[in-house]
């Protein structure tokens, strides 16, 4: 199981007047790709941080893969994160079989060894279209699309079944972005993973998500497919979010 569910989840930052997240019930089914959309400050990234364990809820329950994870610390939850910044380690090469690297470190800390690591990294690198000639390079020697592929590969090497993504395509140019949408969607389908994807982009949401959740003031306003939301919503905020700029 890899689904996500939150119940009566509430979180408020200090010295603020209202909660950043106040969600009664949200479910992401096993193998589903859910895009979470909302304006800046709507609470969508805070929701992701709560799921990852980077923030501690004031109340409520978080379930991942059917297990309550409120007391599971960040780094030990059965999820992989891909941030807007990609958070690649700048001093490490993409891959180095002799030591630590961006792709080997997640496996080394889990006790994997040399040849075992190389076989796993090689398999994942091929799946995301990451060429082996890039392995000796460091992140600042890569293009934006190449860095994105490294971030995807690093998230996939541990065989996690739940992915949390926070605007990972925002830095890509208009030519590279549609290509990476296709790659992420293809990999999602191949792995059968559960994905929660935070985005401002209706283009990203339409291209990749099975459903879209609209967030405002920390609350879920509506969920559904793009077409269902467009056909049924009379809320101007929802329709504006769903209209390409």
Image: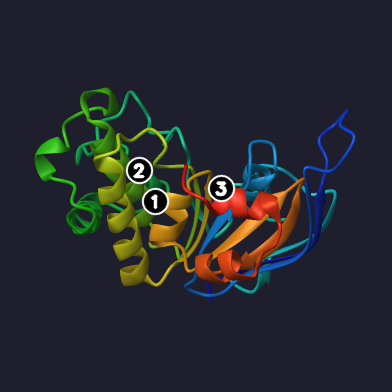
Structural distance between the alpha carbons of marks 2 and 1: 6 Å
- Sequence-wise, the earlier of marks 1 and 3 is 3
Mark 2 → mark 3, Cα distance in angstroms? 16 Å
Q: Give the image location of residue 176, x and y in percent.
A: 25, 41
Q: Nearer the viewer, residue 83 or 112?
A: 83
- Report the disc number at residue 2: none
Q: Of callouts 2 and 3, which one flags the residue occurring earlier in the amino acid sequence?
A: 3
| Residue 4 location, quadrant | bottom right
* Neighbour tally class for label 3: few under 14, some 14-19, many 20 plus, Cα within 10 Å: few
On the question of residue 92 being in view, the answer is: yes
Residue located beneath label 1 in the image: 155
Q: Secondary structure at mark 1?
A: helix
- Image check: 212 left or right of 5? left
Indicate the secondary structure of the residue bearing disc 2: helix
Q: From what the image shows, is residue 20 above or below residue 191?
A: above
* Mark 2 and mark 3 residues within 8 Å of each other at the beta carbon: no
Q: Is residue 56 above or below residue 86?
A: below
Q: Mark number for residue 151?
A: 2
Relative horizontal placement of residue 113, taking residue 211 as reference (left or right): left
| Disc 3 target residue | 75
Secondary element at tag 3? loop
Image-quadrant location for residue 12: top right
Name the one closer to the observer, 37 or 11: 37
Picture residue at 48% right of the left edge, 46% below the top: 201
Q: At x 31% / y 43%, what residue is drawn?
A: 177
- Nearer the observer: mark 2 or 3; the answer is 2
Residue 132 placement, left or right of 9: left
Local crowd size for mark 1, using a 10 Å CA cut-off: few (<14), some (14–19), many (≥20): many
Q: Name the residue located 63 percent from the left edge and 46 percent from the top edge.
A: 38
Q: Position of residue 126 (x, y in %)?
A: 17, 56
Q: Please state the horizontal and vertical placement of residue 175, each as a whole percent of the image.
A: 24, 40
Tell us which disc is closer to us: 1 or 3.
1
């Amino acid at each position: 199981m890899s689904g996500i569910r939150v119940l009566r989840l509430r979180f408020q930052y200090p010295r603020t007047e209202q909660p950043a997240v106040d969600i009664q019930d949200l479910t992401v089914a096993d193998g589903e790709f859910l895009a979470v959309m909302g304006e800046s400050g709507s609470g969508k990234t805070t929701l992701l941080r709560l799921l990852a364990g980077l923030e501690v809820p004031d109340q409520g329950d978080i379930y991942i893969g059917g297990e309550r994870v409120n007391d599971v610390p960040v780094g030990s939850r059965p999820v992989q994160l891909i941030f807007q910044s990609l958070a690649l380690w700048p001093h490490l090469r993409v891959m180095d079989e002799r030591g630590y690297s961006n792709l080997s470190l997640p496996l080394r800390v889990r006790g994997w060894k040399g040849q075992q690591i190389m076989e796993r990294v090689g398999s994942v690198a091929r799946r995301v279209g990451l060429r082996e000639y890039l392995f000796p390079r460091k992140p600042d020697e890569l293009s934006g699309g190449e860095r994105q592929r490294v971030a995807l590969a690093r998230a996939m090497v541990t065989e996690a079944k739940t992915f949390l993504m926070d605007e990972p395509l925002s830095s890509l140019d208009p030519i590279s972005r549609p290509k990476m949408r296709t790659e992420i969607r293809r990999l999602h389908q191949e792995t059968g993973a559960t994905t929660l994807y935070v985005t401002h982009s209706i283009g990203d949401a339409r291209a990749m998500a099975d459903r879209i959740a609209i967030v405002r003031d920390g609350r879920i306003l509506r969920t559904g497919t793009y077409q269902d939301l467009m056909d049924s919503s009379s809320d101007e905020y929802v329709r504006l979010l769903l209209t390409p700029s």
